[in-house]
Each structure stands twice: as structure tokens, then as C-alpha cells.
Amino acid sequence: MAAQDQFPDVAIYPAVWRVLVNVVLYAGFIFTGLVLVTFPETPYRLIGAGVTVYFGLLEIYALYRLVRRTPSLVVGPEGIHDNTSIIAAGRIGWDEVRAIERKKNYLVHHISVTLADKDAVVWRIGLPRRWLVQIMQTLSEKAIALPPGFLAMPLDEVETLLQRYFEKYGNR
């Protein structure tokens, strides 16, 4: 059996129930933002507008993911294709990856993929998605986060899968 056969492309689709949970949560934040916009004080209105726009974008993306059933993550011999969130990095070759580890950012567990040159990966992302990634980049330094929100596979299993492929194809 060829080594390639033991390491085929693995596509992980979003779990519909998880996407629906995100849709409901985002709608709740949008509602809260709209309520804040009705307050007479300017700070509340600005916060409300920001919350509405931010979670409105997330809501649109989540609804789009419900309609368009594409993989959230594809792992294969060539690398990773990240489509796990609105700020997903797209294609990342194994030669660009330096480390893969589980992390917790605030209350959310995710898989952190540390890159040799994050700017080069981000530059490949199309606009306006690149702008969102660059805004979020201030929080994540040289890593790309793979959140569990749109993954049907448990995060531990995704991490194990990524580590297995990284050991085989990374650091060449």
C-alpha cells in the first residue's frame, strides 16, 4: 500500500446543528445591538451599531454555510484548506506550518496553526475577507485559529488528524 493511500484527503463538513446554534446566538447579539442603537446616549448607540454590523456579518456567513455545503476543513498531503470561519485562511501548505497545538482563547477552545510567514498566507486571501483576518490578526500573532464552530468532528480528533499529517508532510 502506497504512503499516499494511508494519507488521503480528508474533508470535514460543518455540523448542521452547530451552524444552527451559531445562527441563533448571532441573532441574539444582533437583537441586543439593535436595542442598544435605540438608546439616546451616543456610546450605547455606537456599541450597538458595532455589535449589529459585526454579528450581522457572522450571521450572513453562518446562513451561507447552511445553504452551501462545502467542507469546513480539508486535510491532505499538500496541506490544509481552512474554511472553518469567516476569517478562514484558505490553503496552507505543510511547508508553511511550524506547529499545531490546542489552545484556549477567552472561553473558546481551538486549534492553533503557527505559520512561518502568516503575512504571506493572509495576503493570498481575497478582499474583503483579508481585512477581517488582518483585524483579528492583532489577537493571534503568527497563528491561524481553527475554531470548532463549523466542524462536525470533535476538536481532539481534528487535532490528532492534523498532527498525523504534519508529522508525515511538515518540516520537510
Image: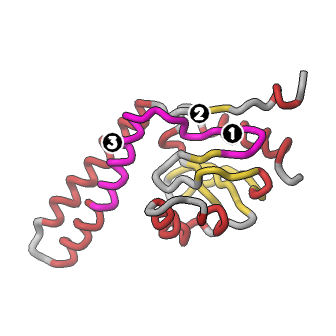
Quick one: label 2, few (<14), some, or many (20+) residues within 10 Å? some
> Label 1, label 3: how many angstroms apart (C-alpha)?
26 Å
- Identify the residue at horizontal 75%, vertical 56% (top origin): 97
**Coordinates of residue 164 in the picture (x, y in percent):** 79, 39
**Coordinates of residue 26 in the picture (x, y in percent):** 32, 49
Disc nearer the start of the sequence (1/3): 3
Task: Determine the image quadrant of residue 154.
Answer: top right
- Identify the residue at horizontal 29%, vertical 54% (top origin): 56
As for residue 57 lying within the magenta part, the answer is: yes
Q: Are marks 2 and 1 in contact (CB under 8 Å)?
A: yes
> Label 2, label 1: how many angstroms apart (C-alpha)?
8 Å
Determine whether, in the image, residue 21 is placed left or right of residue 44. right
As for residue 63 lying within the magenta part, the answer is: yes
Quick one: label 3, few (<14), some, or many (20+) residues within 10 Å? many
**Coordinates of residue 153 in the picture (x, y in percent):** 58, 32
* Residue with the mark numbered 3: 23
Determine whether, in the image, residue 109 is placed left or right of residue 94. left
Amino acid type of disc 1?
Val
**Which SS class for mark 1?**
strand
Disc nearer the start of the sequence (2/3): 2
The span picked out in magenta is 53-80
Residue 75's disc is: 1
**Which SS class for mark 3?**
helix
